[in-house]
Image: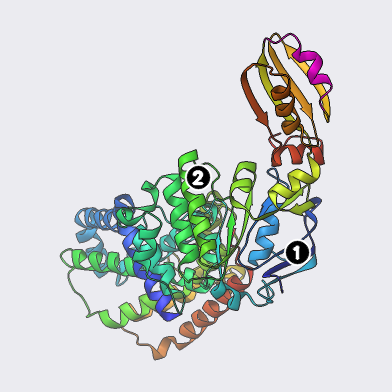
Amino acid sequence: MTPIIRVSGIRKTYGKTVAVDDVSFEVQEGEIFGLIGPNGAGKTTTMECVEGLRRPDRGSISVLSLDPIRDARALQLKVGVQLQQAQLQKRIKVREAVDLWASLYPHPVDGDALLDRLGLADKRKAWFMTLSGGQKQRLFIALALIHDPDVVLLDELTTGLDPQARRAIWDLVREIRARGKTVLLTTHLMEEAERLCDRVAIVERGRVIDVGTPAGLVRKHCENETVVLETTDASAAQRFETIPGVESVTWQNTACTIRGRDGLVTHVIQCLAEHRIHVTSFKTELPNLEDVFLTLTGHSIRE
Amino acid sequence: MMKALLKLTWLEIKIFVREPMGVIGTIGIPAAVFLIASRLLGPRIARAAIQTGGGAVSTVLPVLASILMALSAITSLVTIISIYREGGILKRLRATPLSPTVILSAHVLVKLLFTVLTLAIMVLLGRRYFPPGAPVPLFSYTVALIFTTWAILSIGFLIASIVPTARFAQPLAAIIFYPMIVVSGLFFPVSALPEWMQAVARVLPLGYAVSLLDGIWRGQGWVAHLGDVAALTLFFLAFTAISTRVFRWE
């Protein structure tokens, strides 16, 4: 199947600063694909190259088999974008912005229905400057969807939003996918990537380190599993040391942390059952994309 | 494209009048100052004009007011475009089928409209204080005013296309405008200027604007000023062409 978006070996420098060193990835039809990585990794520059707002120094990009810069006119009709930190006129009304955008395209969708869907129906007459962060982002999503595009590009969609607003936006993005659209987004929030993206590309210092499904990347790079439990059973310490796959067992009074791999959680449960060890608390800690990032780069994404 | 231009222009007009300070500054203050100045000085200027056969300055007062209004329209055009650029509004508009020409033109139309409106108010107010002398071709003058304002607003296109931030916009506009006013014939007749200043005046649009407005006001007719019209058209085309090429979205 031809990918909807294909980025091959792009590089972009600003003077001596290398914003994007070497980035390649492909986005398939109908998926939510995430570019993830810390701020300054080159995600937004990559996105702006895909949007046709910047010309890469090297490499090539095709979106729906078109060139983002050469075929900008044709692509504007098929691609919807939401830019990082975009603004509108302070005193433009929500409804006016949607109307203006609708007038720019040949076949816009119904603006009122769109605002309804995005939960902005009662903000129709509100000035842009009076909207909350989440409402502004929803308006920008509305503007990105007004011409019913096949591809939607979302740059740092939920940055600066509270968790509740963030979840609402995630639902909206899933809904876009459910309508058969292809979504490319950037985020520095690993939770967002895990919950939302079908596949992700991990970007670090202008390069793609790995591409895959969030779960697949975790399996590939972070096999360690952790069990934290509390027990007063005196025999437990000795028994835990012999569990298959165990790498370390550490105690702090009655609290025990067991680290290991290869099905450790299952083996710990079997051990507890077999020896009738009484525990007062039990929880597992499975690795996530943040751990993957730490493993691959040697530093935390939050730094 | 025409539909988008009209839509954007109408929208910008509405957005503009939602900011009370902007409306007061653009229309209210010039009209008020003009009214007060006319009350205090009007009779004296009128008398002086009759005695000397000309204005207190080398051009008539309405022309002076027109040019100053046009220049302030340019400054405010430049400022608003740079605010849009800094705020990321231009960047967002760039990802739509809107072209920079349409965005700039919409703002020009808004400025033009409010400039003409302000001047119309001034003329109406001024009637009481300036007893009609020779009949002034008001219709022709209005056409000439819209044309010249449009033409010299293209300087604003150019400045607006390249200034990085709003803070740069004002001083840059001032650096360009004040010397241009000096050689434009607005305060001193161009023929009284040194040779080299006259040469400078010829490559700047403002002198032609002053000449055209002044001539039309004095009832000289368009045919006598075809040269001015041609020069202003050339400036407009050149500045617009350059600014579309160098336009910075962010």
How far is disc 1 from disc 2 in space, using C-alphas?
Answer: 31 Å
Quadrant assignment for the N terminus of chain A: bottom right
Provide residue B129's location: percent of width, then percent of height.
18, 63
In contact (CB < 8 Å): disc 1 and disc 2: no
Q: Residues within 10 Å of mark 2 (few under 14, many from 20)?
A: some
The amino acid on which the numbered mark 2 sits, given as a three-letter code, is Arg
Which comes sooner in the sequence, label 1 or label 2?
A: 1
Magenta segment: does it hold A81? no
| Element at label 1 | loop
At 40% from the left edge and 91% from the top edge, which residue is drawn? B223
Which of these two is toward me, A162 or B250? A162
Q: Amino acid at mark 1?
A: Pro
Q: Most extreme residue toward the left, as rendered?
A: B128
Q: Which residue is mark 1?
A: A56
Q: Residue at x 60, y 74 (%)?
A: A75
Q: Which residues are magenta?
A: A232-243
Residue A238 lies in the magenta stretch: yes
| Residue positioned most to the bottom | B223
- Occupied quadrant, residue A62: bottom right
Residue in the picture at 83% in, 20% down:
A241
Q: Position of residue A168 (x, y in %)?
A: 46, 48
Q: Quadrant of the C terminus of chain A?
A: top right
Q: Residue A126's spot in the image, x, y percent?
A: 32, 53
Q: Where residue B185 is drawn, which disc sits there? A: none
- Mark sitting on residue A166: 2
